[in-house]
Image (tube, rainbow, N blue to C red):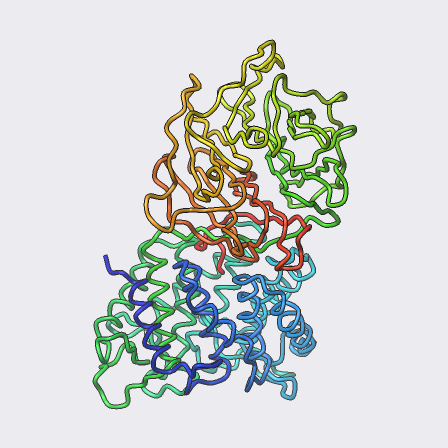
Amino acid sequence: MTDYLNLAVRAINVMQSTWWNGSSSWNGINAWQRPAIADTLITYTLLSDDYSYTDVIESAVRNTSGLSGNDDILWSAIAALKAYYLTGDLYYWNNMVIPDYNSVKSAWTTACGGGLLWDNKKDYKNAITNELWIYFLTLMYQATKDSGLLQKAIDAYTWFVGSGMINGHSLINDGIKPPPECGNNGKTTYTYNQGVIVGGLLNLQLVTDPNSTQPYADLANSITQAVVNSNHLVSDGGILQEPNNQDLDANQVYFKGVFMTQFGHFIGSSQGRLAADFVTQNADYVNQNELTGEGEINAYWSGNPEAAGAILGAAPQGSGINLFLSAYQATNTPTNLWSYVNKISGVGTSNNPSSCSYAQRLYSAWKGSTDDHIWFASMSEEGVWGDQNYIQGAGTSTSPSLASFNSLLYAAWKGSGDNYIWYASTDDSDSWSSGQASIPNVTVDTSPALAHFNGRLYVIWKGVGNDESIYFASMGTDGTWSTAGSSASPPTIPNTGTSTSPSLAAFNGWLYAAWKGSGSDQKIYYASMDTGENWSPQQQPAKSDPYPSTDSSPSLAAFGDEKLYLAWKGVGSDDHIWFSDSSDGETWSPQTKFVLPGLTTRSPALAYFNNCLYNVYSGSPNASDADNILYSYGIYSGNRGF
């Protein structure tokens, strides 16, 4: 199988070594193509987990020189919003996304029933500006969950469909006639006009009803199939081309890559081999017909690459990179990404939060930011958080832990002024069992961890002070702990040790524990226990450098019966959250960086809820949100239109 990601890397290297000006742009491009190419590099970064172009992305996105017209502003705003997703830097949101939104929304007029003006000084309403607006609004909604933004996107979609720009062949012409005539102006059906709208439609499908095929996915399907079957947009050899393919101008040399970017997402969301074959056929042709054989790409994908008039440059190069990335998505399992990060409003913690699914809600619990209360709140399947409350009479100096067991939600914690492990339970009434109880013959000086396994509630913890042994105990459905009535020390995971808090999760008939090494050992270890409480030898989730390492506590969670996930904070000044997954509990994926903003000085908390993997964590002082409680959920790139 062709390594399309490697082809993209090779093409990027050519683009950077040949046309990057070393500062904030590529030589020989139009202004709007600068954020568009930066967007391409963001897509590459997320697909490859290669962050080596982050500085290039940031400097190009921040450069807004030469932009004119509302379409240019929207290209810039979209790249800024994705840069915010990639880096978590609020500069992009506060200084670019919001001002650009406020600027462009004023271009919506009632002429011809609505729609954005291409330029505020002209009365022309074209396809690309309004397509970008729909796409941008759906991205903003994903980032904010502001229903007003979603409604604007739906209103823009409704106007667009009714404007007449979609012709009888399911292709989109360049725009509409000026009022009072309005209606389709019959101008060129550029490829990028067929692509950007697909991105907006896929996002609308995702945020409204991802399991339904009406109406957004159907329209996206009609448009993409119309392109594939078009006589003037596809050459006799099956290669995508512009309608005026023999006379491409400086703008049009980038158009095909825009289409292929969204087509790649579309394949992952709903299409089969026909769509994938179209992308790979184009990618293979471009690869086989490079001018130099070293990754240089001609703008004329379907022409003779050696012919006079071949067009080279950063824009054709970026267009070809989009094609290779699309082919990579068409031939590989969708990449696991994360949603935009949200904040639990009005709450805060000075330690690590915990998370757990119970009674069709996602629960989180945490120590107060300025007190020792144990606070908690829950989120519905619709994403709405209830008010915070605290467990009466309970307090902790560290962090609580949550687990569902025996039709109840349990919390366990270290005392606020003692070293006992205390626990309580609730039946989802927000009223916890009166009279917190302690686990007999157990002491701890860090946070314990809970998990339901084999019909029992298990707890695991580090010993007190210099005792770095990892202990465990369990409780049956009768409420009796295995340590009750015994003066002997609880059992340990043999030949292990940790200087922080361990974590627990049940997965495919085994109980898994993960922890940071003892003392100065920052590597992450894990072991599994069978139903007879026999533990496997400890091992690391990776066998070669870079070893997953942390200076805090890792977190474990099972994604149903499919995968076991492990997440952790980096070492020292690395405040990023990293994660890995395993389908069998033995072979782990390479460590991957959590994005937007994915920064914490403490520990993440994973939980499986509503068919998603949630990550709940407190912020980082480096991001000025140290005590905030943030959360995001895992999704697949092929299903989100990002």
Residue 135: x %, y % from top left: 55, 66
Q: Measured along the vertical axis of the image, is residue 386 above or below residue 531?
A: below
Examine the rendering and report whether any part of residue 170 can be seen: no
In front of the other: 543 or 208: 543
Q: Is residue 170 left or right of residue 371?
A: left
Going 57% across and 74% down the picture, which residue do you hit?
74
Q: Please identify the quarter of the rendering in which residue 132 is found.
A: bottom right
Q: Is residue 599 above or below residue 72?
A: above
| 54 on left or right of 228 | right
Question: How many circles with numbers are drawn on the protein?
Answer: 0
Residue at the limit of the structure toward the right, as seen here: 393
Q: Does residue 377 appear in this view?
A: yes
- Say above or below: 89 vs 603: below
- Up-down: is 274 above or below 32? above
Say which of 635 and 548 sits in front.
548
Query: Percent from the top left, x then y, of residue 302?
Result: 27, 77
Q: Residue visible at 46% across and 38% down?
A: 517
* Residue extending furthest toward the front: 466
Q: Which residue is more in the foreground, 367 or 325?
A: 367
Q: Residue furthest bottom?
A: 308
Q: Residue at x 57, y 64 (%)?
A: 84
Residue 580 in picture, x, y percent from top left: 43, 45
Q: Is 485 or 320 nearer to us in this picture?
A: 485
- Of the 4 image quadrants, the one containing the N terminus is bottom left
Task: Judge left or right: residue 26 versus residue 490.
Answer: left
Q: In the image, residue 17 lies at what x, y percent?
A: 34, 79
Residue sitting at x 52%, y 39% = 555
